[in-house]
Amino acid sequence: MSESAIPIEMTAEPIEPSKDMRVAYTPAVIEDNLAALEAYVEEEIAPYVGAVIDPDDNEQVKGARACMKALNDLKRPIDNERKRVKFAYERPLKEFEAKVKAITTKIDDVRGGIKAQVDAADAAFKERRRALLEEEYAGCAGPIADVIAFEAVLDPKWLNRSTSEAKAMSELGDKVASALKGYKTLQSKELAHKDEVVKRYADTLDLVAALELEDELADRDRQMAEFKAAQQAAEAAKREAMERAAELGSTIIIANRPKNEPAATHEAKAPEPVRRWSLAMEFEGTEAFARDVAAALKELGVTGATIKCLGVVGNV
């Protein structure tokens, strides 16, 4: 039998499980000649330190580009060696981290499967507890069950396993009693905006906030009433001014009608020629009334006149 045909027995080394991670490492020692390299670099860059070129001299600009290339060539091998050492220095660490992460990922995967089941169990527990509390609320809420939603009284902590069913039921009863007391308080009061106030209370279970809303709405109503009253007063004053201006216009027309001309006639007559007239008059009133008079005269076709204030004769 030839030597190459001799069978070789292979045995695998057994691995004993261990809960502790033991790592042995030797910090790398980097030996270098950086001091000598620095001295060399300083010699090489000395001719370029403090260099100033004339931007208008094309030859100097061209020479400056050549200097930049020389400096790049000086730096390149140094930087390449730095990168090579860094890669070699970090490689064992990165390989070690990858192996450790592969192990911890197995733990995370198993934990994730268990967590999904725990989350599902907790969700089912909360649904059962919620249904139980909601049924209890419907039975003890009485007249407020249709006004205050169950969500308004529900405390999220009652749905947790850490809160016993008995404690959750007890605290629910106390909260319902308090809510019912506040609701009856609102019903006993004369409120102009009872529906809005009760809704605010149903949403917040805050009696003070609900009553503050009544004050806010009452103040809004007062402001609206004052605004409408002011509008009505302004409209009444405007109508009065327009009526006075119309009366004034009628007086002007009557005063300027020829004495022998009848007030109205149905007889056909030749068109009356259009003439130019002047108007001189004085009247008393507020500035708003004066503006109304001007508007009335304008509607009558009286233009070209200026109404001037001659002085104050009194206050309205």
Image: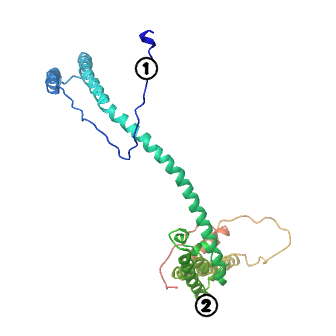
> Mark 1 belongs to which amino acid?
Ile
Residue that sits furthest to the front in the current view: 1
Q: Nearer the viewer, residue 253 or 133?
A: 133
Q: Element type at marker 1?
A: loop
Locate residue 178, reporting x and y percent: 55, 84
In 3D space, how far apart are the residues under numbered discs 1 and 2 (Cα atoms)? 101 Å
Q: Quickly name the residue at label 1.
A: 8
Locate residue 243, reporting x and y percent: 67, 79
Q: Quadrant of residue 281?
A: bottom right
| Relative side of 33 to 152, left or right | left
Q: Quadrant of the N terminus?
A: top left
Locate residue 92, reporting x and y percent: 33, 32
- Would you call the spot at circle 1 few (<14 residues within 10 Å), some (14-19), or many (20 or more)? few
Q: Nearer the viewer, residue 287 or 271?
A: 287
The answer to whether marks 1 and 2 mark residues whose Cβ atoms lie closer than 8 Å is: no
Q: Is residue 195 above or below residue 300?
A: below
| Relative side of 95 to 293, left or right | left
> Mark 2 belongs to which amino acid?
Ser
Q: Quickly name the residue at label 2.
A: 188
- Would you call the spot at circle 2 few (<14 residues within 10 Å), some (14-19), or many (20 or more)? few
Q: Which mark is residue 88?
A: none
| Of labels 1 and 2, the one closer to you | 1
Residue that sits furthest to the right in the current view: 267
Mark 1 / mark 2, whichever is N-terminal: 1
Locate residue 266, reporting x and y percent: 85, 73
Residue 261 visible, this angle: yes
Residue 147 visible, this angle: no
Q: Is residue 174 above or below residue 159?
A: below
Q: Is residue 103 above or below residue 176?
A: above
| Relative side of 66 to 108, left or right | left
Q: Element type at marker 2?
A: helix
**What residue is rendered at 30% in x and 25% in y?**
84
